[in-house]
Amino acid sequence: MTASTPTNSRRLRAEHLGSTMPPLMVAAERVAATVAQGVHGRRRVGPGETFWQFRQYSQGDTPNSIDWRQSAKSDRVYVREREWEAAQTVWLWCDQSPSMDYSSDKEFESKHDRAALLTLATAALLVRGGEYISLLGTDLSPSTGRTALLRLSSELSGQHSDSVPPDVDLPRYADILWISDFLNPLSEIEKRARALAAAGVKGTLVQILDPAEASLPFKGHVQFEGLEGETGHNVGRADSLVVPYVQRLQARQAALTELASRLGWTFMVHHTNNSAQTALLSIYQALAFRSGAQA
Amino acid sequence: MGFLGTIGFLSPALLAGLLGLPVLWWLLRMTPPPPRREIFPAVRLLAGLPQDEETPARTPWWLLALRLLVATLIIVGLAHPVSAPGSLLSNRDGSVIIIVDDGWASAPGWDDRLAAMDALLIETERRGRPVRLLTTAAREPGALQTPGELISARELRPIVRALRPKPWMTDRTETLKVLQQIDDPGSSEIFWVADGLEENSDGKSPVLNSSDFALELQKTGPVNVLRGSSSELAWTLNINTTPTSDTAAGSIAAGGLSFVIHRAEPSERIESSLVARDVEGRILDSKQFSFAAGADKAQVAIDLPNDIRNRIARVEVSDASSAAEVFLMDERWRRRSVGLVSGQNVDSDQPLLSSHYYLQKALEPVAITKTGEIDQLLDASISVMILTDVGRIIGRDRNQLKTWIDKGGVLVRFAGPKLAQSGDDFVPVRLRTGNRVLAGAMTWSTPLPLMPFEETSPFHGLPIPDDVLIRQQVLAEPSASLSDRTWARLEDGTPIVTAEKRGKGWLVLIHATANADWSDLPFSGLFVSMLERVINLAHGVTPVTEGTGELKALQHLDAFGRLQNPQGSARTLGPKGLVAPDRPPGYYGSINAQQALNLGPALNPPVAFSSLPASIEEQTLAQRPELDFKPFLLSAAMALVLVDLFISLLMRGFVPGLRPVIGRTRTGSAAGLLLLICAALLAGTSSVWAQETDDEFAMAASLDTRLAYIITGDPAVDTMSRAGLTALTDVIRNRTSVEGSPPLGIDPEIDELVFFPLIYWPVTADMARLSDQALAKVDGFMKSGGTILFDTRDQQYAGIGSSLGGSTPERARLQNLLRRLDVPPLVPIPQKHILTRAFYLMQTWPGRWSGGRVWVERHQGGINDGVSSLVIGGHDWAAAWATDANGVPLAAVVPEGRRQRELAYRFGVNLVMYALTGNYKADQVHVPALLERLGQ
């Protein structure tokens, strides 16, 4: 195994994190039209494992598609047909922008670490469920199995990227898991989300926040510096800003929730000082039991 | 005058800087500390939030106070505050007269005196009063005291700073006379920087008491006395043993040197020690002594073996601070230099029978002997002269010898045929011509033993062995004084040793020979003891003075007890002299015959000042320290600046560990710190490690017999050397009884060489130049019996038969090296050299190459057992010896094969045997002859 140690250990942690949960099969209302074989029956004949129907042999069928037992029961020759089972592909987006690279206290993981962990754990669960995964913004083609997981894990090793998923064409009815701190301008997020939703993509938004970002625990004269080249902000008394700041943050979260519900997506908030298990469970539920979806 | 002075400033103008403080305060308030920097990803959300207070936080008041304090400390510190001692001067005008005791007694605590005078002058300068300096000791030998000029204190300060105490006494009476000549305008104020000791009385003129002196001074003006603390009063050291030998002969044998130390203040118990040093200042002996509480005198005896005692050049109280605590020793205090003069010329033919041989053996433990003619010996300042059978002393020698004995020389004469035939008057008793033979062919009498020594004899108490018999002697004419002059008798009462005191010296006659011709005495231990007692009579002889009886000064003792070369006018010393300004203590005479003049004998036991009259102001120097606050204030300011820096960093969040920082950046600094600690630990342990390996090397090298080779730094050569010596060691183990261990490679720059009997030194052209240290090691190795085999490995290029000419770079390099070493003359191995027969008989010395010559030291007698310290050749022996682990040779030998390699091994065996056994093998050559002689 050639993966570097940090990514490797993160992957192991992620697998361990998901080990208590059953394999995750995306509750896909409509499976994205990929050729990948999977668990989602397409209710028509095609490659798959589940029996669909017997059909009379006709010219052009390969001899080894003949079901001999069935054919032996009668004079006709029958061909066994299976249901076309396709896999759903979940596109993962883990925000790797510099602003994720932050933790207010050495006790806490950085937001990026937590986001990557959740991404990997979800991916691990999906792979166990036979689904296909891919990381947006990379040339990782949708695939499944351990190899996919390993490649994903190495892609998450911390090269900085944009805050929002790149504008690529996703297959219709794909699923997207979008983990970010959602601290970039709201308009950017909204524009991208709408574009994706227009393509029929189902989304799950997970906001990862550091506790300091949730509560602004600073006092006195502080010069706040951003991580993405934002203009610094000089505050005479930081403690006087707590209430307005928290209000503003909540307003943003409300806006995101509203956006998500309008698009039929899910939005959830996770703080890095909370257990990753909780967040993973929420994501599991969001993906597996999407309201109104059929298995 | 209070002891606690006020605080003054040396540069008060700088205090004006304090006015700037309010401005600083205002500035500091206006520029608040920069904000704390915080990384915050959600900074976008903060933008545009309404803020309660637009004005930034102020500098906290305590920080402001801290910074103002720093500024104040710096300003005050730069103004240079000192705790000015209380004023010494009164407020009157008029001149100031400083009288300094600058005799020997001022040497302890002289710096304090200078400092006190300097402080006084500074104050005088400030007041603008003129000042005059008087010193109570003569400024120069022979110079009279002069009243100093009335000058400004500024001019006087350098003069005072250059003032040194003189190694002689003060003369305050003279000072008073000088003072009375002074007629300064206005009333003068007098400061007497006193040494605290009463002046010495020499018995001639009445001595001026310190309080009288002070009262006399008071006639000129008010008097302040500045003196050191009583613990700093000088001690005096004097010898208790008189140099002239007036004491009864019997009591001289004690032999020790006794010293007495006096102090002026008999207060509490003080322990110190007396140190005896030789000419080079090395300590020969150190004796503790203590002044008992209330005692002003302490005695110390230094009792050393004669040869060590004779090396004493100076005795001093440890940490001597004045010339009076140092006692210089000269020939008078030594027991030594016995001159031997012989009347026999034939002695040299049979040295073991000569009387000089007996005397030299007997005198070895007690004295240094010199042999020569009488006049030569007298010039060499001997204290005892022994004449063996010199018949008649003639000519100029006579007079010289007479003067010498009068001055304290001891002349010992042994009888003999010559003296028996023709005597002179250099004998204590008149002698009969001819001698008395007690056991001859023509006599009936038997040899006589000695009678026990009488109490008046210096030999009293020496045991007389039974087997000492006198067979022949010269006889004294009977006279009234004969019995008084007799120190030893035979059993029949005839004198065998007689002596007479002449002047300060002695004339001793042994009525027998100094060899065994006439008696058994020279065989016995008694002879040694008797000679020792006789030599103890001598206390050294002051060198014979010429002409005016004056001596040139060699070295002077300054007031602090340090020897200095004389400067200025030549000073002379009469035969009798006590220290005086024109006779400073030190050494006089010539290098060969020094005479010491000490301060101690010139001094009476020191007496401290009696209490001075109440009208005299007294101050102690030690209680007037001037405290300089500047460094304290500035360092306090510095410390506070550091505190401020730390606080600033803290407030800005730069102190790691105290404020959260971003995860990733931390690891780097932590790793760096860890690295630093590790490096420090490693650096700490490495020297210990080196030490251990040093010991390991020494153990490995010395516990087994090993050959060694010099590491040249050329890997090919070094491998070959190692393989060669290993193979040679194996060969030697197989063929001889030498059981060597594997060879060691050594670097002369680092390793010790002395452990090895033989070092193989392959010379390469690019060999590094040896440092002087390494050269010294190599030289020491060769001198201490080691052998080095230099191998230039270039025989094939140098050509057959070429000599040691520098025809190849290796040879040039070797010559370069040898040029820097002390190399004896070299010859090609001679035909009968031990190397040709140390184990194998051989005449050629092939290595990898054959032919050519091998060079050794020309045999120079028994040095290093005749083993040459160098063997030089160019045959590349190591390559011929070298084999791999399976015994397969590593290099081909040219031109022959096996035979040549075998010869190379044989050379190696011979060389190792030669280095290990020396000329033993050469002696073995004689074994057949010896056996034949023994009749076997």
Image: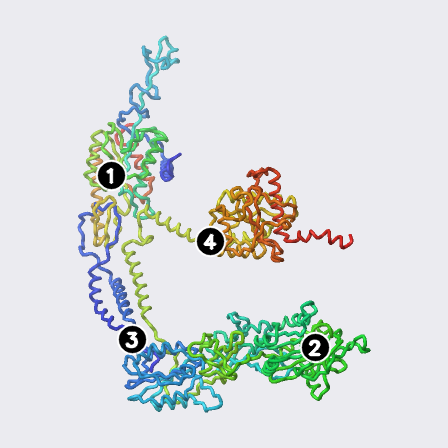
Label 3 sits on residue = B8
Label 2 SS: helix
Answer with mark 2 or mark 3, whichever residue precedes in sequence: 3
Q: Residue A131's x, y, as percent?
A: 32, 29
**Residue tagged 4:** B685
Q: Are marks 1 and 2 in contact (CB under 8 Å)?
A: no
Chain letter of mark 2 equals: B
Residue B470 or residue B698, whichever sits in front: B470
Mark seen at residue A163: 1
Q: Quadrant of residue B732?
A: top right
Gap in angstroms between the C-alphas marked 2 and 3: 91 Å
Q: Chain of mark 1?
A: A
> Closer to the camera: disc 2 or disc 4?
2
Residue at image location 60% in from the left, 85% down from the top = B503
Which chain is home to disc 3? B
| Residue labelled with disc 2 | B418
Q: Local crowd at mark 1 within 10 Å, few (<14), some, or many (≥20)?
A: many
Residue B112 in sight from this viewpoint: yes
